Image (tube, grey):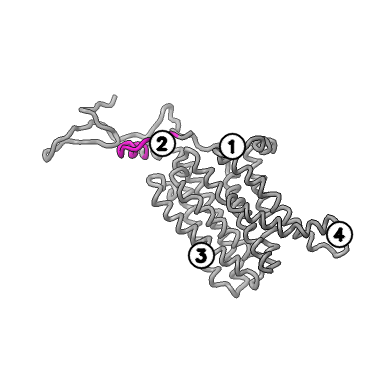
Amino acid sequence: MTQTQHGGSPGNPRRSGAGGGGDRVMVPEAAFESYYGRQVVKPAPWEHDIAVYLFSGGVAAGSSLLAAGADLTGRPALRRVARFGSLASLLVSIVALVRDLGKPARFLNMLRVAKPTSPMSVGTWILSLHGPFAGIAAAAELAAVLPTRWKRGPVRLLLALGRPAGIVGAVTAPPVAAYTAVLLSDTATPAWHSAYKELPFVFCGSAAAASGGLGLLGAPVAEAGPARAFAVGGALVELATEHRMERSMGLAAETLHRGRAGRLMGAAKALTAAGAVGALAGHRSRVLSMVSGAALMAGSLCTRLGVYEAGIASAKDPKYTVVPQRERVDRGEPVRYRG
């Protein structure tokens, strides 16, 4: 049994010495354990499908924005790449989400109600609003390559809907890129919750870098200017806000530098920085543009995987829950328990 003399708290020990008064707390170093060896916070019951979902959703959102801009500025090749990329990414997102949910009916059941206080409910509705318009825009792109004799009736209507659908898809794209960060930070997982201020900006920057990288991969150099600017700007936002996030997370930031999460985040920074430099230098080189685009996409994927792994690691170690709570108590701040 731990014995304490004249009060005190384990998180803020006070000792009396020859040079001054004060109470002495006879408490050993804290062992961050819980009853029966269980974690204080239960790790999220998600598989790596969700990490892929975080990445593909960002690519889909950024590509919708890029496609609308390319359409309005007369860049058909870039528009085509971005629209097809958005549709493919959305399909990957849906498959990953349904795999995690277990059956498609569970996704449909979430549309029975709308709960503004639930990031999962809001995210489901955002995807449901964004997806059809992105799909129509991609279908219009397919219709555009059909023989002229087939461009009648429904096909002509589809071609006419391509631009309006693409614009609506672009308007609904930013929430798709950002809401997954809100979904993570609204949990009790220490690393995710402590990053709630910066994580949406990290994810949005990562989405822009990845979708811009996709544009560099598929579009000719003559039309890739907007994709290049989008990629470099997104990379800079991602790197800057990720650095600030690490400084604001406190103790939980350790999880971003250790183990598998640390390796992934290190790779993400290196790939994103190298991709941004290559994108700037490769404005006349198709090969360098493609290599840079691939690096930016790989860096964005590593960022999502790294954040995911850091969150799981922080939930498994009670230290990342107990120490920050004790520090808040010592500062006189309220401790909120999140479920």
How far is disc 3 from disc 1 in space, using C-alphas? 41 Å
Name which of mark 3 and mark 4 comes first in the sequence. 4
Give SS at disc 2.
loop
Whole-angstrom CA distance, mark 2 to mark 1, is 31 Å
Q: Amino acid at mark 2?
A: Pro
What residue range appears in magenta? 324-337
Residue designated by label 2 = 318
Quarter of the image that includes the N terminus: top left
- In front: 221, or 130? 130
Q: Is mark 4 in CB contact (under 8 Å) with mark 2?
A: no
Q: Nearer the viewer, residue 80 or 112?
A: 112
From the image, tell me which residue sits under label 4: 152
Q: Residue 95: horizontal and vertical position, in percent? A: 67, 45
Q: Nearer the viewer, mark 3 or mark 1?
A: 1
Q: Residue furthest top?
A: 1
Left or right: residue 18 versus residue 304 is left
Question: Mark 4 or mark 1, which has the lower sequence index?
Answer: 1
Circle nearer the N terminus (2, 1): 1
